[in-house]
Image (tube, helix red, strand yellow):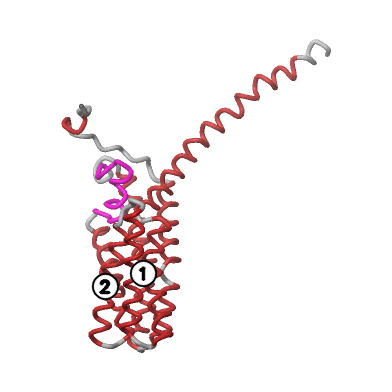
Amino acid sequence: MSAHGPQGPQDDDRSGPGVHEPAGSAAEPERDASKEAAETVLKAFGGVRGMIDMTLPGLVYIIAFNITHKVPAAAWSALALCAVFVVVRLVRRETIQHAFSGVFGVAIGAWISMKTGKAEDFYLPGLLWNVLYCAGLAVSALVRWPMIGLMLGPITGEMFTWRKQNPGRLAAYTKATWAWVLIMGLKPVILFPLYFTHNINLLGWLKVALGIPPLLLAMYVTWRILLTAPPPIKAELDEDEQAPEK
C-alpha cells in the first residue's frame, strides 16, 4: 500500500493540467467570439453615443414644447442640441455619421412642424423612416442580401464572403435581419395611431421611451445569433491592396 500511496497524488498532479487545459482552450475562443460579436454590433450601430444622439433631440423637443407651447421654439431647441453633438464629435475627431444622420432627421421634422404648425409633425419623418427601414430590412432578407450582413460585413473584414462562401453566416445574418424587422416594426405599429390622435405629449414621450430599448433588444438578439454562427471568412484583398506601403 505504501508503494501505491505516493503514486496517487503524482497521478493527480500530472492529470491536473490535462483536465483544465482543454476547458481553458475551449473557453478562450468562445470568449473571443462573444467579444468580437458584441463589438461588431455596437460599432455598426454607433454604440452608446450613437443611441444618445438619436434619442435626446426628441426628448428636448417635447420638453421645450411643454414649456413654451410653441412649435418653433421646440424645433429650434432640438436642432441646437443636434448641432452641439456634431461640434463635440468634430472637436474630439470622432465620426459624425450618427450625429449627422440625427441632424438630418431632426431638421426635416422641424421644418415640417414649423410649416404646418402641428407639433406632432415633428415626429412624422421618423415614423415614416421606421416603416421604410423595416420594409427595406424585409426585402433585403427575401432577396438573400440581408441588411445586417451588409452592415456588419465590412466591420468584421469578411465583406460579402458570407453570401456564397459561408452559408451558415448567411443564415445567421438573414435570421438577425428578420429579428430587426419584428422588433423595430413595433415602433410604427404603436406610434402611428397616436400620431393621428394629435396627442403630442403621449406621442412624444412614447417616442422617446421606444427609442433605445427596442434598439438594445435588437442588438442583443443579433449578438446571440452571431455567437452560434460560423466565424467570418475574411475577404481576400486585391494584389494592389496587399502591396506593402512604401
Placement of 147 over or under 184, stated as above or below: above
The reply to whether the magenta stretch includes residue 155 is: yes
Residue 85, quarter of picture:
bottom left
Give the residue type at disc 2.
Ala
Of 21 and 60, nearer the camera is 60
**Residue 2 picture location, percent across and down:** 83, 12
Of 240 and 128, nearer the camera is 240
Q: Secondary structure at mark 2?
A: helix
Boundaries of the magenta span = 145-161
Q: Which residue is depicted at the point 35% across and 65% down?
A: 84
Placement of 29 over or under 96, stated as above or below: above
- Label 2 vs 1, first from the N-terminus: 1
Residue 21, quarter of picture:
top right
Q: Which mark is residue 169?
A: none
Of 14 and 120, nearer the camera is 120
User: Which residue in the rendered view is the most extreme toward the top?
Assistant: 3
Give the residue type at disc 1.
Leu
User: Which residue in the rendered view is the most extreme toward the right?
Assistant: 2
Residue 237, quarter of picture:
top left
Label 2 crowding class (10 Å Cα cut-off): few <14, some 14-19, many 20+? some
Q: Which mark is residue 107?
A: 2
Which residue is labeled 1 in the image?
A: 81
- Number of the front mark, 2 or 1: 1
In which quadrant will I find the C terminus?
top left
In which quadrant will I find the N terminus?
top right
Circles 2, 1 touching at the beta carbon (< 8 Å):
no
Q: Which residue is depicted at the point 50% across and 35% down?
A: 28
Q: Which residue is depicted at the point 42% across and 85% down?
A: 66
**Residue 145 picture location, percent across and down:** 24, 53
The reply to whether the magenta stretch includes residue 222 is: no
Q: Secondary structure at mark 1?
A: helix
